[in-house]
Amino acid sequence: MQIGDIVKSIKGRDINNIYMVKDINNGYCYLIDGKKNHYLKPKKKNLKHVRLIENFAICFKQFKNANSINNNVIEKLKIYK
């Protein structure tokens, strides 16, 4: 799993939700969905509780601000919902 991948939650209150990986650190991944969990406030989730759907690494550096990242994430995740 790497930054930019599309994952699905398999445990917890948010089961079956689709997210994009923002960061990975110490056994946890930080997830964004562009709606509730924005780029500036990602959801922290154990790596064991998510399943990789697709390797879809995008470069966050190409975007100028957090709003454009959130909008892009929303568009990308619509494919999977």
Image: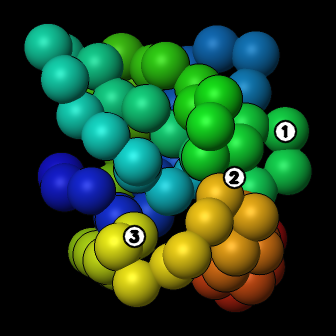
Q: Are marks 2 and 1 in contact (CB under 8 Å)?
A: yes
Quadrant of the image containing the C terminus: bottom right
CA distance separating discs 3 and 1: 19 Å
Query: Looking at this view, is 58 or 55 the one in front?
Result: 58
Task: Give the label on residue 33, or none.
Answer: 2
Dot 1: element: loop
CA distance separating discs 2 and 1: 7 Å
Quarter-of-image position of residue 37: top right
What amino acid is found at the position of numbered circle 2 in the picture?
Asp
What amino acid is found at the position of numbered circle 3 in the picture?
Phe
Closer to the eye: label 3 or 2: 3
Q: Residues within 10 Å of mark 3 (few under 14, many from 20)?
A: some
Give the percent coordinates (x, y) of residue 51.
37, 45
Task: Give the label on residue 36, or none.
Answer: 1
Determine whether 35 is above or below 28 in the image: below
Determine whether 34 is above or below 59 in the image: above
Dot 3: element: helix
Task: Give the label on residue 60, or none.
Answer: 3
Residue for point 51% across, 39% down: 31
Residue projecting furthest to the front: 64
Dot 2: element: loop
Give the percent coordinates (x, y) of residue 64.
55, 75
Q: Are marks 3 and 2 in contact (CB under 8 Å)?
A: no
Query: Looking at this view, is 13 or 63 the one in front?
Result: 63
